[in-house]
Amino acid sequence: MGIKSLKQTSERTVPSVIDIKYEEIRNEMNELKSVIAGRHCAILLPGKSIKRLETDIKKYADKDICWTSMGVFNVLEKGILSKIDKQLSIVLDCATVPTARFPHYEKYARKPRLEPYLARKKRNLLLTTNGMIRDAIKPHYPENFLDKYGHKIVIIDDIFPGEDRAKWMDVPNSATLLIAALFAGEARSIVIFGMDGYKGDISIGYESYYKPGHVVKERFHAMGTVEDPGINRDTGYFEERFPHLLLDYRNLFDTAIPIFNCSPNSIYSCPQKITYEDLEVFYGATKH
């Protein structure tokens, strides 16, 4: 793909399904905009294609990129960003698990990565939902957790207008919400890594991930099994719905910022795919 094709149109030729002005909710996004600070944003997802970024990451050591992630974000941060002495600025965690699994999952999986992340002196944010506050944090975390870290927590429900919030929160997967948040936070651009998608055997789907051993542990803590029937479903839903959601986000947040998927052999047709060679031109990578 030539670099000329990276230009994306700023025109919004189809009206949004939900007609709402972003100005009505702009004041709730000050923390998010402050951390993004007009920078390029990169989303690290755990598809195995992100191994290429692990190899190339030193090319971007001198770039002021707002690095973001979700899920087992600590694995991606350690495996990739630590090579250039960088840390994540924004993390999304709104994963739900069966009610009976919450005590185990919070104790052995989520809390051990969330608390050290939030305890950092460096400015960073956790994006989550009202549902996770209600079902996970309040029942299973220390009473002072929200008092201690609340200034670093953004409730992602609040980036959407209240009267239509349920519609906006009905998304094909969690990554969709992270993308929406970066639009709301006025990112300069969004590039997604490791967004590969999956359509194979759910019993072995973990083989499609970066560092799959960690994914196996995460699944077991969450579900009590290493199978995840949701990965096929999520891939299909995202492919079907995201092109329409992307248009709605552009209308809602009144933005035309570029968004790309830099994940070789990704199943997804939207966002626009670019190669790592295109990425070097886009970011102005340093040669190593």
Image (cartoon, rainbow, N blue to C red):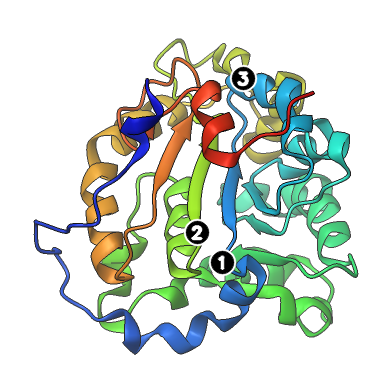
Pointer 3: what residue?
48
Q: Residues within 10 Å of mark 2 (few under 14, many from 20)?
A: many
Q: Residue at x 66, y 70 (%)?
A: 35
The percent position of residue 92, horizontal first and vertical second, equals: 61, 56
Pointer 2: what residue?
188
- If you read the primary sequence from the N terminus, does the residue marked by circle 1 or circle 3 appear first? 1
Of residues 261 and 97, which is closer to you in this image? 261
Residue 9 horizontal side relative to residue 53, left or right: left
**Type of residue at label 2?**
Arg
SS at badge 2: loop
Q: CA distance from mark 2 to mark 1?
A: 5 Å
**Type of residue at label 3?**
Lys
Residue 281 horizontal side relative to residue 78, left or right: left
Q: CA distance from mark 2 to mark 3?
A: 26 Å
Q: Could you tell me if the residues under marks 2 and 1 are in contact, i.e. CB atoms within 8 Å?
A: yes
Pointer 1: what residue?
38
**Type of residue at label 1?**
Gly
